[in-house]
Image (cartoon, grey):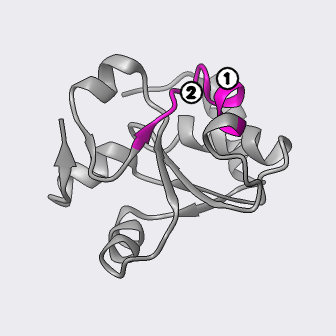
Amino acid sequence: MKHSEGFLKIVNDSKSRIRETTPEEVRRRQEAGEEFHFIDVREDNEWLSGRAAGAIHLGRGIIERDIETTIPDHNAEIILYCGGGYRSALAADSLQKMGYTRVISMDGGWKRWRELGYPTES
């Protein structure tokens, strides 16, 4: 997908302040039994068509509204993903502004997760 210049500008600004990881690292951590919250921030229709195994859904449009009810611990580790890593970067930046200290965006997102053949759910 080709993104607009304005969108990429705000994504790159967010990426300058957040931590990122890879699908390979997330999967390694899952297999090692490490504990973290794995959140899909894609749209409802994207979530319904399939998702990474073990993820919960808090779409980009409602994550700021619902995160404190879903994950009240601001020190909990949270890994966010979207289709490719752009919306999750924006969401990670927002959650950091809300006081969450251990938020990570998964670069490559759902697209890369599927390319690697990692477990999915529907």
Nearest the viewer among 119 and 74 is: 74
In the picture, the disc for residue 109 is none
Cβ atoms under marks 2 and 1 closer than 8 Å: no
**Residue at x-position 56% and y-position 27%:** 60
**Residue 117 in view, yes or no:** yes
Judged left or right of residue 90, residue 100 is right
Name which quarter of the figure residue 23 lies in. Answer: bottom left
Q: Quadrant of the N terminus?
A: top left
Q: Is residue 114 above or below residue 62?
A: below
**Quarter where residue 42 is shown:** top left
Query: Circle 2 — which element?
Result: loop
In the rendered image, residue 79 lying in the magenta stretch gets the answer no
Q: Earlier in the sequence, mark 2 or mark 1?
A: 1
Residue 6, labelled with which disc?
1
What residue appears at the point 58 percent right and 61 percent down from the top-left corner? 20
Q: Residues within 10 Å of mark 1 (few under 14, many from 20)?
A: few
Which is more toward the observer, 9 or 113? 113
Q: Secondary structure at mark 1?
A: helix
Instruction: Report crowding for label 2: few under 14, some 14 to 19, many 20 or more residues within 10 A (C-alpha).
Output: some
Query: For residue 59: magenta?
Result: yes
Q: Amino acid at mark 1?
A: Gly
State whether residue 55 is above or below residue 31: above
Which residue is under mark 2?
A: 60
Residue 65 located left or right of residue 83: right
Position of residue 47 measured from the top left corner of the image (x, y, whole percent): 32, 28
Residue drawn at the location 49% of the way across and 26% of the way down? 3
Measuring from the top left, give residue 56's x and y in whole percent.
Answer: 42, 41
Q: Which residues are magenta?
A: 56-68
**Does residue 115 sit above or below 102 in this rendering?**
above
